[in-house]
Image: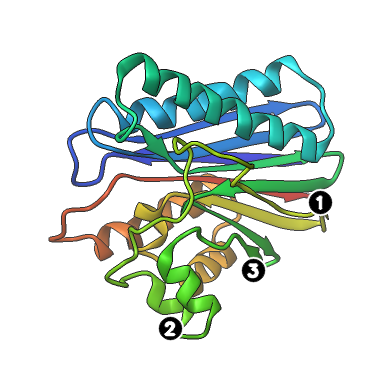
Amino acid sequence: MITYAVLSKTGGRQINEDSVGVRQTSDGIFCVLADGLGGHSAGEVASGLAVESALAVFDENKLAFGEMLAACMMKGQNAIIDEQRRQNRVREMKTTATMLLIRDNKAQWAHVGDSRVYRFEGITIADRTRDHSVPQMLAIQGEIREKDIRFHEDRNRLTRVMGFEWDSPKYSLSEPVELTASASFLLCSDGFWELIDEKDMCKLLKKNPQPEQWLAEMEKVVLIGGKNKNMDNYSAIAVFFRV
């Protein structure tokens, strides 16, 4: 059985530049989350196009795992580039994107930018995407610790996003994973994960047996962490796979 919950809030901003979308079918689920960059009427347009394009590809095609995710990513990228040209806003209209496909007891995901996908087995993090950002590169090189990414001075410097011209695909694609009886997934924008650490994610997952409860409890931690700050938009999609 697959259950899910969705959260997307403005935080301390006037406009929500995040976009989220979910399609559940008889044999699985497809989720997409995007965090727009570039300011009012640019960031939200880019993230909206990424999500709408991905959902349209999913609705119209029955592709294999990697082919589906690749097609969704490229459709969103091309839609954003076309809209940039139409509005003459090449410098402004950008977005991150994360996508998760579960079908027939298998899962695969793709991402570009610093919105993340976490995979949990039981109450333990089994995998997470690596940000396309300067601090993530520093962490991979051993110059900073992973936990220091959250508040690094260059944390918002992204190395890959949708909306820059690609001479080759810039998204990262996971390998397909066979799901266990208690797999959980969290897709989230940086406005969410920067204000809750992985220990709290796991602790709250243990205490909350439903995805909407888990998201609600994590949101409380996010709001405490963002108190008296100019909070970014924050969005998340929680997916539970249970046998």
Q: Please give the residue where the numbered disc 2 appears in the rendered image.
A: 144
Q: Is residue 70 above or below residue 191?
A: above
Residue 103 on image: x %, y %: 81, 38
Q: Secondary structure at mark 1?
A: loop
Residue 95 location (% of width, % of height): 42, 39
Residue at screen point 27% across, 57% down: 223
Name the residue nearer the viewer: 79 or 45.
79
Q: Residue extending furthest left?
A: 228
Mark toward the viewer: 1 or 3: 1
What's the residue type where badge 2 is placed? Ile
Sooner in the amino-acid sequence: mark 3 or mark 2: 3
Give whichever of 31, 152 is nearer the camera. Answer: 152
Question: Which quadrant does the N terminus fall into?
Answer: top right
Residue on which disc 1 sits: 176
What residue is drawn where x is 46% and y is 83%?
145
Residue 127, above or below 24: below
Tell which of 77 and 115 is nearer to you: 77
Name the residue type under label 3. Answer: Ile
For the residues labelled 1 and 3, the Cα–Cα distance comes to: 20 Å
Determine if residue 197 is in view.
no
Residue matched to label 3: 123
Q: How far is disc 3 from disc 2 in space, using C-alphas?
A: 26 Å
Q: Estimate how packed mark 2 is, as few (under 14), some (14 to 19) or many (20 or more) residues with alpha carbons within 10 Å.
A: some
Could you tell which of marks 1 and 3 lies nearer the N-terminus? 3
Q: Residues within 10 Å of mark 3 (few under 14, many from 20)?
A: some
The amino acid sitting under disc 1 is: Pro
Q: Give the mark nearer the N terminus: 2 vs 1.
A: 2
Residue at 84% x, 33% y: name it. Answer: 64
- Image position of 33 (left or right of 180): left
Q: Is residue 78 above or below residue 219?
A: above
